[in-house]
Image: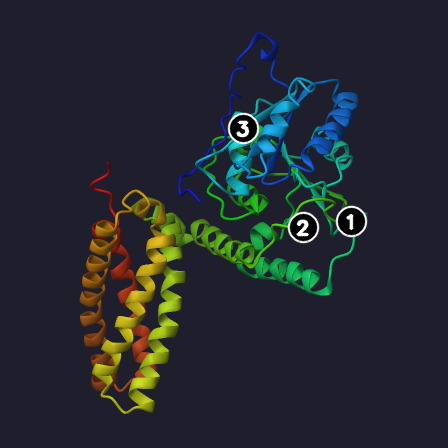
Amino acid sequence: MPNDVLEVPLIPPSGESAEQGQPPHFSLVIPTYNESRNIVRLVETLSQLLDTALLGDYELVVVDDNSPDRTWEIAEDLSDRYPQLQVIRRQQERGLSTAVIRGWQTARGEVLGVIDGDLQHPPEILLKLLHEIHQGADLAVASRHVEGGGVSSWSAIRRFLSRGAQVLGLVILPRVLGRLTDPMSGYFLVKRTAIAQRPLSPVGYKILIEVVGRSNIQQIAEVGYVFQERQAGESKVTWRQYRDYLHHLLRLRLSSGRMGRLAQKMDFPLGRFLRFGFVGLSGVVIDMGLLYLFHSMWGFPLTRSAIFAAEFAILNNFFWNDRWTFGDLARQQRSPSKVFKRLLKFNLVCLMGLVLKVLLLNILFNGLGVNAYLANLVAIAIVTVWNFWINLKLNWRVTQVK
């Protein structure tokens, strides 16, 4: 996903034709990927509903991530029948959350909304959400956890994961998730004035958390709805979505606290550092495990064991940092020679950090008598900051692009 910070304009973009001159009251974004079997029915249902309720004073914005099943093409074919429909085909970006924001950036309505493209969100709930907005709410959320809400036929495991994710969010971000009964909802409306010109940088699928965490939301209303089972197509919920959710929570927590304010003053890329930290955790597992094998199981001296363990961790970390942490920069220099140069520089920077780590380890272990594994962990934490900053400024900067 792109690392760019996105903003919704306060003044809606002007229409491209005379027919579009007057901005609509309501803009509903439908992010899609491989929804060719659902998009026709969804557009038909939404149009019939909103034509009656708003007398045409609305627009539907389909934002498709270049679906292999050509969802975007099917949606475009509907434009002649439904003049309130516009279609955006994204070929360079991916991700539901950024698709929603890109749709809002194009939308012209005073009220902005989002609904899934898979018919799991009942369209008739839109009228209740609009009513809450007209009653003064800045944000109206369709919730599965208030009166009238629920899920149709989820398994016990899926229910447990959903509730577990919510509890985890309450622990990490109580001031944000504590305002919602269903922070995982992807079905809501928001006033443009509440989110306009607010920097948004979401991770994964949970755009609502970003909206509440970074926008000027005063009054929130919730409307119960029953989450429907998918009628066509395949579910996109994977373990990666839970990982992105955790990443998003941590980034919002850090950016909203003292550390986040300090990072802004210092122009420190906190989100990228968090990814670097996640990669570093995998390296810690490798480092600590191999240290145990070399030192405790096989009897190697502590210094030699630490060097061997760290080198294996370095190789692991380079692979994931090149693909994920600095992936947007690495993709601009993809040639094998560039990758090899990055590997050499990464190894050099980390070996410099390794020297620092070994010095710290020996000071803590031999000089201060700290337990070897605790001393190793403390040294790793200090060197992680060193490695990130030097790699950011030296290794993954883009200097040669054709």
Residue 219, percent from left and from top: 65, 39
Q: Nearer the viewer, mark 2 or mark 3?
A: 3
Q: Are marks 1 and 2 in contact (CB under 8 Å)?
A: yes
Q: Residue 92 carries which label?
A: none
Mark-to-mark CA distance, 1 and 3: 32 Å
Label 3 packing within 10 angstroms: few (<14), some (14-19), many (20+): some
Which image quarter holds the C terminus? top left
Nearer-N-terminus badge (1/3): 3
Q: Which amino acid does label 1 sit on?
A: Gly
Q: Is mark 3 on a helix, strand or loop?
A: strand
Per the image, the residue denoted by label 3 is: 88
Left or right, residue 377 beside residue 131: left
Between 336 and 208, the residue placed more toward the observer is 336
Quarter of the view holding residue 157? bottom right
Q: Which amino acid does label 2 sit on?
A: Asp
Per the image, the residue denoted by label 1 is: 149
Q: Which mark is residue 182?
A: 2
Nearer-N-terminus badge (1/2): 1
Q: Which amino acid does label 3 sit on?
A: Ile
